Image: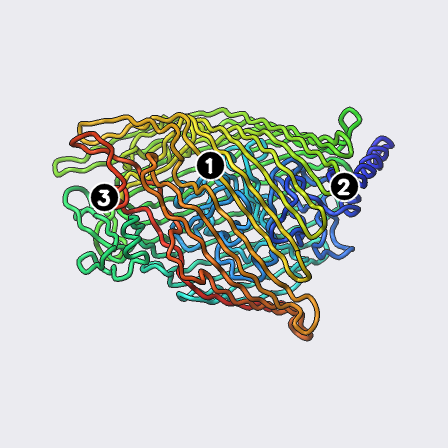
Amino acid sequence: MPSRRHRILRSRALALLAASPLAIPLGPAAAQAQPAVRSGEAVTLEELSVSGDGEGVGPSAGPGTGQGSGRASGGPPRAAAPTPLDKPVGEVVTSIGREGVIDNRAATTVADILRNSPGVTVRQGNGPRDIVVSIRGNNARATGVSRNMVVLEDGFPVTQADGSSRFDLTDPRAYNRIDVFRGPQSPFFGNFATGGALNFVTRRGAEIDGVEVGVDAGSFGYLNNYTTIGGLSGPFEYSLFASDTRGNGFISHNSFDTQTINFLGTYTPTPDNRFTLKIINNTLFTLLPGRTSLNQFAINPFQRGCLTAASAAAGCTTFNLLANGRFGATVPVTADQGAFLRDDRRTIVGARWEHDIDAFTTWRTQLVFDDRNINQPFYTTAARGDFPGFNFLSDVTRRGDLFGLPATGYVALAYNTLDSFSRTYNRVLGAGPALGALIADQDTTQANFGGRARAEVQLSDRWIAVAGISAENTTIDGSNTSYSYTAARTTTTIANVNRSFLNVAPELALLYRPSEAWQLRGRVATGYSTPSAGNLFVTPAGVPGNNTQLRTQENLGFDVGFDWTPVETLRLSVTGFYEFFRNELITQSPGAGLLSFTFNAPASEHRGVEVGASWAFAPGWSATAAYTYDDQVYTRYVEQLSAGTRSTRFDRAGNKIPGVPANQLLARVGYEQRTGPLAGLGGYVETVFQDDFFLDNANLLRAPGYSLVNLNLHYATDLVGYAKRLNLFFEVRNIFDWTYVASAQNLANSISAATGLQNGAAVLANTNGSVFAGAPRNFVGGMKLSF
């Protein structure tokens, strides 16, 4: 039985909750009395009231307390004290739901969903669903692995201990919503969260309540067959998603197939104990086209007629493979000749135990095993490796009072580790993806160990204050052995690393709600992102070697914004941000076929504005928009370039940081028929705009921007009989058949070996290994039956 003090405290808290939509939920009774309100940002661009289960969004989030899950009143009880990461006070968060984004369109990749959030940039990576995601321009320079953010599924981390995240394993059909945390988030999520965080929330079994079978098909041989199974039986709840996706690709030599399994199960034996099991497995096989130069893109964007180098059409990109795989003469090959491909597997298994110590205190412990296995023979090298890791987290959430004020306290202890066993080979022309000589053998261990604490205090019925801090020690230990070859000898070079990084990140936030229509917020927070082991062993020449001097990237960010909801049908959110970076980690390519390398820019600034809006302006009609202005500049960075015997230094202060578009916008207008014989019929037209951006530190060359228009029609209806519901959709993408750059890797500037002068834009425009074209006009349709 709760003590008299606890009963008084709960009565006081419930009274405050009824008086203020910003109040922190204190338990199941509070959660049922008041729908959950996200305090970071009132705008949910696709679904303002998220339908689903209110699944947690933090590293330790449990079942949550959201409404609309479809759980029967006699089902297992919810967590008595959901973690503050479940509905984070003071954070800048956008939640993107299923309606119009997942249910009624193809959503072939997570890019189709995440474009709906302000502050997010998406680019094509090296694979069909390998999308490079950046938040506020962080990670915009990457071309495959996403960094500078923490990614979770149902509160289980899918970012490994070296900061790497890939989205091959994310089939959008599996998810109920995605939460986007913007700005420095290391106090919340620890290492690598300098840009923010993403939490993918899968659908709960009680919501599915049966079986769903669907198929999407479209241009270029695209086919996605998927099944969702879910239900609730006594103390057990389960959901299983499985899909098989394949296609020919719209660029030559780009066919693919990928299979995904995603399982979430919960067992609630008693009201005070909950067990959760999470399993993800993804296999991927895809052929890869060559990244072109900007000039090649203009001539032959989709690499037609590029079967062999000898018969290649104008604009085909080629890469030079060593004829003997070791040294000396090279042979030009196209992507078809070189058999460029990826053959990867990712397996994640996580388990969590939640225990309610009393009505106000919950203890959670979770352990995740994450194994990434790669076989990537593309361009002039081939990477093979296995990257197994573990992620452990234990936390306690306590809801009580602080100096007589309702408050929530949260403390956590976290540890994760990753063993990297990676080998890099030269490529050689031969049958299939033939390998040449071994050029690098890397064996490292990276680990992060630290703690986090957070307090949310209800100062009054209109004010909430938040304070948080994390402290974490990162260690990288191991070695990389490089091999170089000549006719006379083989040279072996060993680079050892034994680095330790200690980082501390505090945050403060304040929210004020002067009326029902207005919410004002301010936040100052810090973030840190250490180098990964892989960054330490690629030199600026783009070859394996010693780059172990890299430092931790740090940022200090200020957010000021407001959420305005004058009526239920109109919501507007505006956030201004200004972030100061020190030792920003920036990755770029030194040239075609070479490995991308990472360097520290001593000082830089990121500043901008994010706007999210939704307006139901007439019966059945609605409009949504997500706009970002992002201005990033070097404030202190001197770059040294070398060629032959010459070396020249260039001051880049004041230059734009490459890879970041200044303006981007998604705008959508749609109509839904709510009544009558056509109820369930709807459609929308949307435009996706992205500004041009620089490709190099000297700001000599720009990748062109684009503006695409998409059209969607959809229909949903309940059925009588064996099947319960039918969903249909048809979509025309890129209606005006715009040829555009979907991805462009940053290029390193160079100097003339004869004069020492910097080479101009013409040299960069002819440097291949950078550009992937986006999809031309294409059609996709699909159906889903629910049983």
Q: Position of residue 389 (x, y in %)?
A: 47, 40
- Which mark is nearer the camera, 3 or 2? 2
Q: Position of residue 59 (x, y in %)?
A: 59, 39
User: Mark 1 sits on what residue?
Assistant: 631
Q: Is residue 177 above or below residue 539?
A: below
Q: How many badges with numbers are in the image?
A: 3
SS at badge 1: strand
In the picture, the quarter occupied by the N terminus is: top right
Whether residue 500 is visible here, answered yes or no, is: yes
Q: CA distance from mark 1 to mark 2?
A: 42 Å
Q: Position of residue 619 (x, y in %)?
A: 69, 61
**Mark 2 is on which residue type?**
Gly
User: Mark 3 sits on what residue?
Assistant: 437
Q: Residues within 10 Å of mark 1 (few under 14, many from 20)?
A: some
Judge left or right: residue 53 versus residue 293.
right
Q: Residues within 10 Å of mark 2 (few under 14, many from 20)?
A: many
**Mark 3 is on which residue type?**
Ala
Q: CA distance from mark 3 to mark 1?
A: 44 Å
The numbered mark, 3 or 1, whose residue comes first in the sequence reads 3
Q: Position of residue 684 (x, y in %)?
A: 56, 61
In the picture, the quarter occupied by the C terminus is: bottom right
The numbered mark, 3 or 2, whose residue comes first in the sequence reads 2
**Quarter holding residue 40:** top right
**Mark 1 is on which residue type?**
Asp
SS at badge 3: strand
Disc 3 and disc 1 in contact, CB within 8 angstroms = no
Q: CA distance from mark 3 to mark 2?
A: 61 Å
User: Mark 2 sits on what residue?
Assistant: 27
- Which mark is nearer the camera, 1 or 2? 1
* Front residue (pair 306, 237): 306
The numbered mark, 1 or 2, whose residue comes first in the sequence reads 2
- Which mark is nearer the camera, 3 or 1? 1
